[in-house]
């Protein structure tokens, strides 16, 4: 008894409001042996002489203990002890008189039940199933509630016997949902059914329970009227998010119920927001169904959101505030704006935009500033989702928006800047090209609004959005005006910082300077000396805690300016800037992980590394520790039940993912972006410094390889994959043995990561990384087991490519399929095609390095590419299959005959394909066939010539979309004429070939064409030179055009030979001058420059 009394005091310590007492209680609790702890907790939970709070905390601690240490406790009990423990918990829940304590004990019972379902799905506690059915049918409503609560917590309680119990489960839920005598039973029945449906998303299960939807919706509506517990509305949100098709038979009814709630202003805002979330989530998860079955609700939804967006509090200090805090995410205006953005993206502009546009004139013409503000924010919100429909009417929209830069109310002017900035991003670069002459002057004028710093800063922020995607030539034309304005504001705001301590506008202007410099690049050199001294002064002196963000942004600005103007201009300042950054790093010791300067500094160091190249090496010992520390951040994770998640759901630093059975995985997201950024900077160091980075390679590769499976952040995995080939290149400086050891460390994990990667975008980067690693290391880098794994991966991915395509075809047969679904399916197809291109990269790397040794592996893959070439496949499949066979021919040489039945006929046929990308791949293949495949293919090369001529001589062959395919065809004819012309009359073809020149778009293929031209000229080929050298003016014109367009690298052999021909011709002044007289001015100037460079 004395021990139990001591334990009671311990529990009271847990409930204390004083941290010290609570901490001491937790420490003492941790010292108690596990079995004693369970005994004390069970006794305390059952002791009716204790107050409810004590019994509650005992039950909570018991559940947590069983969740974390079940095996350590239960498995060590004798069989009779296990039975007694189960019986005691089951009895406790039935005799507990307090509803709140009973709920906690039920959660203990759920935890025991959950742990007694083995890995094979066998429920090892049949008594609990008997209790569930008996209690659910009991006349005692308390027992009914308990049974339903248990089922809600463990909807998988039936394990692998669930199918046998479907009728019993359905009947239990049906009776409970229609229990007119007890609302609490109906309430718990909705929770139970929701949990069951979320766990069982199979179509047949969902359909069999859909006839319970009407009573379920009815109880949800009842809970909305009572407004005492929003759990059921949250259940509806969960169903809408995870199993929305379950709601399809009554989707319109669900949306109607929720819309009425959203429009009912007497409801608490939190209830209105949850009801809105149901509608918006359904729009995102089943947009086609919403468009088909609930289209009549869209006008009302849009109008309701626009009205909610006018619900803004007056704040007379808003425009002059120097501290900008994030808007409350629970404000009606914020929730509505976010919802408008989401439904526009989900349902599409065709569905949503007309209703927004029809409402805008009245709102924008309103005397109430809140309506004008809401209208402008609506334009900002819908741009991404309504892009296609808004683009044709941008001029009308901008005619309206620009006027509000001069609105009498500062918050409307702010909203106008916001709309301009957002549209500059959403509609780039069309927006910048069409409206620069009005946007730039408008924003510059608004940046004079010094009495309203929030507006002034936001105008500068909009200029950042505009600058980022503005063509350099356009922005450069405004550079004098922009920089004069920015310099004036910088000077004035710097003085304000000193005199008043205000910094909001100064922080923004520094960012705007950086953005303009980044776009204008070398054009910024003229302004460098005006800005750099002041910016360096800020870095040197803005050292107090409240100026950390300003200093960080200034560091970013200086490094971006350096990158813009280049090493020649920036190098004299680079050392001083690096010293300033490193001095601040060392003078205050290590920066805290959440110091806003740290991320800016890490990015700035990488930019300066890019500028200085190998000269950056001396700084590595100082910059690497903080970068590695940031890259090594380990996120805080937790496993919480649903109730614990509810308690912290408003904490924006955490994200949660449901694992089912009321369990949730949580991760603290703070620091993840900084980690990803640091990893990206390490990629930059390895790429830029190469061998100079070798001393750090081992530490970095040991950090990066495990992060290939860092599933908390896609950017981290992407950077890890991207780094590997660069790190291998760096490691070459440490010798072949070290390089091999490092690759052994990388290879298995990289292949495992590719095999299990869930995100297509990251997977594509990992495939690209594998290809580059193979190219870096060369033949022999993959042993037999690794090569087998690569083959298995490629097989798996290619099978998935066909499966995904079939799945999209099936979606086109769905009852809710429409044109907007088709747009989404096309987007999915583009993702698959991009991945197919990366598969092609891997095969290219393997053929490039292994040559014909790769053929035995390719034998197991070739059937996929034969299938990709089938006429019924989409054209991108044809393109990438041809690219793969191009590599087989180019790097397999004459032995490619092994696969001629697979590639030869399709390659000839697809030269006439409607898609230029396919024609280009086919033409390239025929060219390498002529160049590398040998005499076996002489007949095929002869057959190819007429096909290629058709491509070249087509009326639209030189159109911009066709020119690359055409030049590849010209190059292919060139390669056949030069290398495989046994079955061809070369003399007959040469006049035609000469008439096709010059080529200048495809810089990869041009050297082959001009090398052959040099061969023919240097051998005095009379067909090319013409009778009495009559073709010389034409030949000089071709060479002049090549020089004028800079088609060839000056160091290339072809360029030197063409220049040699010109020099030789120059020795005969009369002929040379005669040829020059036929040239354009650009061609003459190009030849003159080429000759003067000698």
Image (spheres, rainbow, N blue to C red):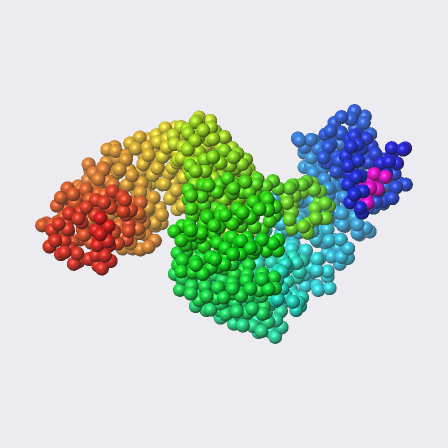
Q: Position of residue 8 (x, y in %)?
A: 86, 38
Determine the residue located farthest toward the bottom in the rendered image.
367
Residue visible at 71% across and 33% down in the picture: 117
Q: Is 474 within the magenta?
A: no
Residue 385 as seen in the image, left or right of residue 780: right
Main SS, magenta residues: helix
Q: In which quarter of the image is residue 985?
A: top left
Q: Position of residue 739 (x, y in %)?
A: 44, 30
Residue visible at 65% across and 47% down in the picture: 654
Q: In which quarter of the image is residue 735?
A: top left
Q: Is 13 within the magenta?
A: yes
Q: Looking at the picture, tell me which residue is in the foreground, 42 or 319.
A: 319
Q: Where is residue 977 in the image (x, y as percent from the top left)?
A: 21, 41
Q: What stretch is highlighted in magenta?
A: 9-16
Q: Is residue 976 above or below residue 218?
A: above
Locate the N terminus by quadrant. top right
Q: Can residue 559 be seen in this view?
A: yes
Residue 95 as seen in the image, left or right of residue 620: right
Q: Is residue 353 above or below residue 654?
A: below
Q: Where is residue 727 in the image (x, y as percent from the top left)?
A: 46, 36
Q: Looking at the picture, tell me which residue is in the foreground, 329 or 247.
A: 329
Q: Looking at the picture, tell me which residue is in the foreground, 761 or 239.
A: 761
Q: Is residue 102 visible?
A: no
Q: Is residue 366 above or below residue 1018?
A: below
Residue 193 as seen in the image, left or right of residue 969: right
Residue visible at 82% across and 36% down in the picture: 41
Determine the residue located farthest toward the top in the rendered image.
78
Residue visible at 54% across and 62% down in the picture: 494
């Amino acid at each position: 008894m004395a021990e139990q009394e001591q334990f009671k005091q311990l529990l009271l310590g847990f409930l204390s409001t004083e941290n010290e007492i609570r901490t001491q209680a937790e420490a003492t609790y941790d010292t108690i042996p596990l079995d004693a702890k369970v005994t004390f907790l069970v006794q305390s939970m059952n002791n009716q002489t204790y107050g409810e709070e004590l019994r509650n905390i005992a039950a909570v601690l018991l559940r947590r203990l069983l969740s974390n240490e079940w095996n350590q406790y239960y498995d060590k009990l004798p069989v009779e002890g296990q039975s007694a423990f189960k019986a005691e918990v089951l009895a406790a829940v039935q005799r507990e008189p307090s509803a709140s304590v009973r709920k906690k004990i039920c959660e203990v019972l759920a935890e025991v039940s959950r742990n007694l379902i083995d890995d094979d799905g066998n429920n090892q506690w049949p008594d609990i199933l008997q209790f569930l059915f008996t209690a659910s049918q009991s006349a005692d409503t308390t027992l009914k509630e308990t049974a339903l609560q248990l089922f809600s917590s463990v909807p998988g309680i039936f394990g692998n016997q669930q199918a046998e119990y479907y009728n019993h489960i359905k009947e239990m839920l049906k009776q409970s949902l229609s229990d007119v005598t007890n609302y609490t039973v109906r309430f718990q029945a909705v929770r139970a059914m929701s949990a069951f449906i979320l766990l069982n998303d199979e179509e047949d299960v969902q359909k069999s329970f859909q006839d319970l939807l009407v009573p379920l919706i009815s109880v949800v509506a009842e809970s909305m009227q009572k407004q005492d517990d929003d759990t059921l509305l949250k259940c509806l949100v969960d169903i809408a998010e995870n199993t929305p098709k379950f709601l399809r038979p009554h989707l319109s009814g669900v949306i109607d119920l929720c819309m009425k709630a959203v429009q009912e202003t007497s409801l608490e805002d939190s209830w209105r927001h949850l009801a809105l979330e149901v509608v918006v989530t359904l729009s995102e998860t089943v947009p086609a169904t919403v468009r088909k079955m609930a289209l009549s609700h869209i006008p009302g939804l849009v109008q309701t959101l626009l009205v909610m967006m006018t619900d803004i509090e007056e704040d007379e200090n808003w425009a002059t505030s120097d501290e900008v805090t994030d808007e409350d995410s629970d404000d009606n205006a914020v929730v509505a704006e976010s919802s408008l953005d989401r439904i526009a993206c989900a349902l599409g502009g065709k569905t949503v935009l007309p209703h927004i546009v029809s409402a805008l004139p009245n709102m924008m013409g309103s005397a109430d500033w809140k309506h004008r503000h809401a209208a402008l924010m609506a334009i900002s919100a819908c741009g991404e989702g309504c892009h296609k429909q808004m683009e044709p009417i941008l001029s009308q929209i901008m005619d309206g928006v620009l006027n509000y830069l001069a609105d009498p109310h500062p918050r409307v002017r702010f909203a106008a800047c916001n709309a301009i900035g957002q549209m500059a991003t959403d509609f780039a670069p069309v927006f910048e090209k069409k409206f620069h002459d009005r946007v730039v002057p408008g924003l510059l004028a608004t940046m004079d609004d010094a009495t309203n710093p929030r507006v002034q800063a936001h105008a500068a922020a909009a200029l950042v959005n505009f600058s980022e995607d503005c063509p350099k030539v356009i922005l450069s034309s405004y550079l004098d005006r922009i920089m004069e304005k920015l310099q004036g504001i910088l000077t004035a705001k710097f003085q304000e910082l000193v005199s008043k301590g205000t910094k909001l506008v100064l922080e923004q202007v520094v960012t705007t300077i950086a953005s303009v410099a980044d776009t204008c690049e070398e054009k910024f050199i003229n302004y460098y000396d005006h800005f750099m001294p002041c910016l360096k002064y800020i870095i040197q002196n803005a050292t107090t805690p409240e100026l950390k963000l300003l200093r960080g942004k200034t560091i970013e600005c200086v490094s971006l300016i350096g990158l813009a103007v280049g090493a020649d201009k920036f190098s004299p300042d680079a050392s001083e800037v690096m010293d300033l950054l490193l001095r601040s790093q060392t003078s205050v010791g290590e920066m805290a992980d959440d110091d806003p300067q740290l991320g800016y500094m890490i990015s700035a160091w990488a930019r300066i590394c890019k500028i200085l190249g190998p000269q950056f090496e001396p700084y590595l010992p100082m910059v690497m520790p903080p970068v590695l520390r940031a890259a090594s951040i380990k996120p805080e994770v937790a496993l919480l039940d649903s109730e614990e998640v509810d308690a912290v759901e408003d904490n924006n630093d955490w994200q949660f993912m449901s694992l089912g059975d009321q369990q949730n995985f949580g991760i603290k997201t703070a620091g993840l972006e900084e980690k990803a950024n640091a990893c990206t900077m390490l990629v930059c160091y390895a790429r830029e410094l190469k061998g100079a980075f070798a001393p750090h390679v081992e530490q970095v590769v040991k950090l990066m390889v495990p992060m290939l499976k860092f599933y908390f952040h896609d950017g981290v995995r992407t950077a890890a994959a991207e780094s590997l080939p660069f790190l291998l290149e760096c490691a070459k400086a440490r010798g072949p043995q070290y390089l091999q050891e490092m690759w052994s460390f990388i290879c298995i994990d990289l292949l495992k990561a590719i095999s299990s990667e869930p995100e297509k975008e990251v997977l594509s980067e990992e495939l690209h990384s594998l290809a580059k690693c193979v190219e870096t290391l060369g033949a022999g880098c993959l042993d037999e087991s690794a090569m087998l794994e690569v083959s298995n991966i490629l097989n798996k991915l290619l099978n998935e490519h066909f499966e995904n395509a079939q799945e999209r075809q099936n979606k086109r047969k769905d009852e809710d399929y429409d044109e907007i679904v088709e747009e989404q399916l096309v987007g999915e197809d583009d993702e698959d095609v991009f991945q197919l291109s990366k598969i092609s990269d891997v095969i290219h790397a393997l053929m490039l390095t292994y040559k014909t040794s790769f053929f035995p592996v390719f034998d197991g893959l070739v059937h996929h590419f034969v299938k990709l070439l089938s006429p019924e496949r989409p054209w991108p499949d044809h393109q990438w299959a041809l690219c793969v066979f191009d590599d087989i021919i180019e790097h397999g040489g004459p032995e490619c005959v092994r696969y001629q039945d697979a590639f030869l006929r399709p390659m000839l046929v697809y030269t006439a394909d409607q898609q230029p990308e396919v024609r280009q791949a086919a033409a390239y293949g025929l060219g390498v066939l002529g160049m590398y495949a040998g005499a076996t293919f002489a007949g095929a090369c002869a057959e190819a010539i007429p096909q290629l001529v058709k491509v070249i001589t087509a009326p639209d062959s030189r159109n911009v979309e066709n020119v690359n395919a055409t030049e590849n065809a010209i190059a292919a004819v060139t390669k056949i004429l030069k290398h495989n012309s046994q079955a061809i009359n070369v003399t007959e073809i040469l006049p035609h070939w000469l008439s096709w020149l010059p080529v200048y778009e495809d810089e990869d293929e041009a050297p082959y064409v001009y090398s052959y031209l040099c061969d023919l000229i240097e051998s005095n080929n009379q067909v090319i030179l013409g009778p009495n050298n009559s073709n010389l003016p034409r030949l000089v014109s071709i060479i002049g055009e090549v020089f004028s367009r800079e088609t060839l690298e000056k160091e290339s052999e072809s360029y030197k030979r063409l220049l040699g021909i010109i020099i030789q011709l120059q020795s005969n002044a009369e002929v040379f001058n005669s040829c020059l007289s036929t040239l354009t001015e650009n061609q003459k100037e190009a030849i003159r420059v080429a000759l003067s460079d000698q």
